[in-house]
Image (tube, helix red, strand yellow):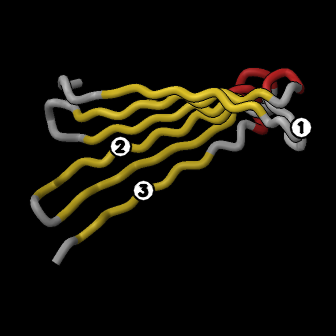
Amino acid sequence: MSENCGVATEVQYDFLKKNKGLMGSPLFWRVGGNGTTKAGMKLNWQLNLGDRFWWTWKGTMPLNKNTNFTISERLCLKNMLMDPKNADYSMGLAMEFKM
């Protein structure tokens, strides 16, 4: 990674207690980051911890000044460790052409 990367985190508490978060409590935690590799690929990642533990990341690579290639993935880490058949894994690919 190059020097221009960052990480942010936040904690949320549902005072109305309408949603279940960490260990059944109304507490939620989110942490994420972004950066750019030396090859120019932009990376973003996020971990959302609540009733489920979601891991999401996206990478965008410029192929030339008018074309970008993007890959993204999302899965439930809690299910992946405890029930791998139901990890709720999804993956996406995209190609962007600018005119």
Quarter of the image with the N terminus in it:
top left
Which class describes the residues within 10 Å of circle 1: few (<14), some (14-19), or many (20+)?
few
Amino acid type, mark 1: Lys
The quadrant holding residue 17 is: top right
> Residue 2 — which label?
none
On screen, residue 38 above or below 42: above
Dot 2 or dot 3: first in sequence order is 2
Which class describes the residues within 10 Å of circle 2: few (<14), some (14-19), or many (20+)?
some
Residue where numbered disc 1 is placed = 17
> Residue 93 — which label?
3
Amino acid type, mark 2: Gly
Dot 1 or dot 3: first in sequence order is 1
On screen, residue 91 above or below 84: below
**Helix or strand or loop: what does disc 1 sit on?**
loop
Q: List x then y, in percent, for residue 5.
A: 28, 28
Q: Can you tell which of label 2 and label 3 is closer to the viewer?
A: 2
Taking the image as drawn, is residue 62 in sight?
yes
Q: Can you tell which of label 2 and label 1 is closer to the viewer?
A: 1
| CA distance for labels 1 and 3 | 37 Å
Quarter of the image with the C terminus in it:
bottom left
Residue where numbered disc 2 is placed = 59
Q: List x then y, in percent, for residue 70.
A: 35, 53
